[in-house]
Image (cartoon, helix red, strand yellow):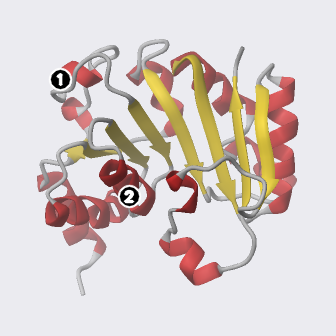
Amino acid sequence: MLGKLEKKRRYYASSYALYGEKVPPPGQWRAQLGFPQEAALILEVGCGKGDFSLAVARLEPQALVIGLDRKADRLYAAVRAAETLGLANAYFWQGDALLLEAAFAPGEVSEIWLVHPDPYPKPRQAKHRLTHPRFLRLYHRILRPGGLLHLRTDHQDLWRYSEEQLAMQGAHILWSGIGHSDKPTSPWLTIETDFQRKKGGPTYYLQATWP
């Protein structure tokens, strides 16, 4: 079994890895990574081992899919899978979500996904939640007009908290629900992650945009 240091080394050596100077400058993500300006740019924040980003990249081969996570050893699993699949449209960025405003031009991102993020359930941890106002303001800035923010979580309190914070930030919630019965038809919403396979239980969905 590989240790963390070896996983990090292999991540940094991958052509699918984005870090440091390999991260495109604001407004240049599509051009630098070889995509036309009209291509969708889909960002998953907190992608972990990349299950969701990899599945979306396979479903949407014309889109540029970026998975963001802070830990290189987790992203090693994502780049290894991308190499095995031979994907041409997925990249995995080691960075912090607080860097989003500095990394993307206003309106550069088409959609943002938060898939089973850490709920940080204690009140004193609220600022770390990926739907805290400090993150929502960043998403609003980098999303194109009408761009979508999606949340999938198994944590009911985080789901409710996210609804409240989005409303306070002026976002319009397009739909919000539990399980599969009341959500729009989309193959993306049925993508099963490793977390879901291990945890089980209901999944809460939320889709929002800023008018």
> Residue 119 location in percent, x, y?
72, 58
Picture residue at 62% right of the left edge, 59% below the top: 116
Above or below, 66 against 39 in this view is below
Q: Please tell me which residue lies in front, 197 or 122.
A: 197
Is the C terminus in the top left, top right, bottom left or bottom right quadrant? top right
Q: Nearer the viewer, mark 1 or mark 2?
A: 2
Residue 18 in the figure: left or right of residue 150: left
> Is any atom of residue 81 visible in this view?
yes
Picture residue at 50% right of the left edge, 62% below the top: 191
Is the N terminus in the top left, top right, bottom left or bottom right quadrant? bottom left
> Is any atom of residue 9 visible in this view?
no
Above or below, 128 against 209 in this view is below
Q: Which mark is residue 81?
A: none
Check whether the beta carbons of the residues at disc 1 and disc 2 lie within 8 A of each other. no
Q: In which image quadrant can residue 163 be found?
A: top right
**Kind of residue at badge 2:** Ala
Residue under label 2, please give it. 55
Which of the two labelled residues, at mark 1 and mark 2, occupies the earlier sequence position? 1
> Residue 138 location in percent, x, y?
59, 24
**Kind of residue at badge 1:** Gln
> Residue 204 location in percent, x, y?
75, 58
Within 10 angstroms of label 2, few (less than 14), some, or many (20 or more) residues?
A: some
Above or below, 88 against 73 in this view is above
Residue under label 1, please give it. 32
Q: Please tell me which residue lies in front, 8 or 194.
A: 194
Above or below, 116 against 194 in this view is above
Q: In which image quadrant can residue 73 be found?
A: bottom left
> Residue 139 location in percent, x, y?
59, 27
